[in-house]
Amino acid sequence: MVTKLTSAESLKDAGNDAMKREQWKEANDCYTDALHLTSDDDKTLRATLYRNRSLSRLKQGDFEGAESDCTKGMR
């Protein structure tokens, strides 16, 4: 059985692969899905996901979303 954390890590990796291919929307979606699978206790993973998603949003021109994710990642 696949745990939520394993799935979140897999989605993070898929998002990272999409970023390498400059597929910003796909990466954003992977990071968003991964965030939905993590709990507030997974602070390190959540910070990484917010940081990565902020870059994908920045690349898409979503400056407010990028700023919001940066702020959330620091909490």
Image (cartoon, rainbow, N blue to C red):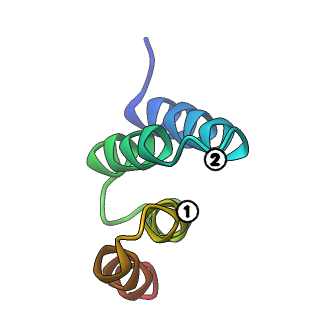
| Label annotation for residue 9 | none
Please tell me which residue is depicted at 50% across the width and 59% down the height of the picture. Answer: 56
Please tell me which residue is depicted at 33% across the width and 41% down the height of the picture. Answer: 33
User: Of 27 and 48, which appears nearest the observer?
Assistant: 27
| Label annotation for residue 52 | 1
**Residue farthest to the right?**
20
Q: Quadrant of residue 69?
A: bottom left
Q: Quadrant of residue 29?
A: top left
Q: Residues within 10 Å of mark 1 (few under 14, many from 20)?
A: many
Horizontal and vertical percent position of residue 51 = 53, 71
Does the CB distance between marks 2 and 1 fall below 8 Å? yes
Q: Secondary structure at mark 2?
A: helix
Circle 2 sits on which residue? 19
Horizontal and vertical percent position of residue 11 = 50, 35
Judged left or right of residue 19, residue 69 is left
- The residues bearing labels 2 and 1 have C-alpha atoms spaced at a distance of 9 Å
Please tell me which residue is depicted at 52% across the width and 59% down the height of the picture. Answer: 45
